[in-house]
């Protein structure tokens, strides 16, 4: 994300999975002349595009494998752009749909993938990578877990600025182990757009041009 710094030198400019810019969109509505048949066709196309995306990322190790496969990267980003176009009128920033604990499936963020790939150098391993959003409270936590007890998370304030866009500003960060905690002072701001969202999946593009695919975690993460 542009002009954004993170609390650790090793993950400079990292908003974890906060993700490309695109024009503001309008709320979902049926345009004049839209038929039930055309709506059904669009829904089928979107479902097919979603299935294609999930198939493409299924063996990509959260994006690590994609880093060395430009052709696969192009296929995945093209699939995301197709979904964004088909879904351009969906409202994805309301509290009921956006709030929750989201778990990383795939991303292009190099800093985040570096941590996942190299956590073993620090005598640990990367577990779930999460984005925890509460629209009503206007906050967001970006989280990397290091089982069994470690976690690094960054707190942010958020503001809904359009039907798909969320602006954020970092407020603080914490690196925590089993019996210790180390606060860190992040600074920076940015935005991301959820270009697709349903009960189980969310697809995101951000200000830096990064992409993110997350699913709704089967648990709720709290500090």
Image: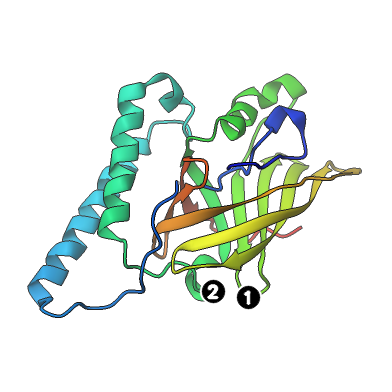
Disc 2 is placed on an element classified as: helix
Q: Which residue is mark 2?
A: 95
Q: Is residue 164 visible?
A: yes
Inter-mark Cα distance, 2 to 1: 6 Å
Q: Is residue 201 visible?
A: no
Q: Position of residue 64 (x, y in %)?
A: 49, 27
Query: For residue 175, what is the image quadrant?
Result: top right
Left or right of residue 195, residue 159 in this image? right
Q: Position of residue 97 (x, y in %)?
A: 48, 70
Q: Position of residue 194 (x, y in %)?
A: 45, 57
Q: How many marks?
A: 2
Disc 1 is placed on an element classified as: loop
Query: For residue 77, what is the image quadrant?
Result: top left
Q: Position of residue 14 (x, y in %)?
A: 64, 38
Q: Give the camera-side residue of 145 and 131.
A: 131
Label 1: how many Cα within 10 Å (few below 14, some 14–19, many 20+): few
Which tag, 2 or 1, sits closer to the chain's start? 2
Q: Give the camera-side residue of 103 and 45.
A: 45
Query: For residue 141, what is the image quadrant?
Result: bottom right
- Residue at 76% across, 57% down: 223
- Residue at 49% across, 68% down: 93
- Residue at 50% across, 48% down: 206
In the rendered view of the protein, which quadrant contains the N terminus? Answer: top right
Q: Which residue is mark 1?
A: 136
Q: Does residue 219 lie above or below 187 as drawn? A: below
Left or right of residue 153, residue 67 in this image? left
- Residue at 91% across, 43% down: 180
Label 2: how many Cα within 10 Å (few below 14, some 14–19, many 20+): some
Circle 2/circle 1 CB separation < 8 Å: yes
């Amino acid at each position: 994300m542009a002009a954004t710094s993170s609390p650790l030198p090793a993950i400079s400019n990292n908003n974890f999975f906060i993700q490309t810019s695109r024009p503001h969109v309008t709320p979902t509505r049926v345009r004049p002349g839209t038929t039930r048949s055309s709506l059904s066709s669009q829904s089928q196309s979107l479902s097919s595009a979603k299935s294609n995306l999930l198939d493409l990322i299924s063996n990509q190790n959260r994006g690590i494998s994609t880093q060395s496969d430009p052709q696969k990267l192009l296929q995945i980003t093209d699939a995301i752009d197709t979904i964004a176009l088909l879904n351009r009128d969906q409202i994805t920033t309301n509290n009921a749909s956006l709030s929750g604990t989201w778990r990383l499936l795939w991303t292009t963020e190099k800093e985040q993938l570096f941590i996942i790939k190299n956590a073993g150098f620090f005598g640990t391993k990367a577990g779930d990578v999460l984005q925890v959003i509460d629209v009503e409270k206007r906050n967001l936590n970006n989280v990397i877990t290091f089982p069994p007890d470690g976690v690094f998370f960054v707190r942010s304030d958020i503001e809904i600025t359009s039907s798909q866009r969320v602006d954020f500003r970092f407020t603080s960060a914490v690196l925590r182990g089993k019996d210790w905690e180390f606060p860190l002072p992040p600074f920076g701001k940015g935005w991301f757009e959820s270009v697709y969202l349903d009960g189980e999946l969310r697809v995101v593009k951000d200000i830096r041009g990064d992409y993110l695919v997350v699913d709704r975690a089967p648990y709720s993460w709290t500090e």
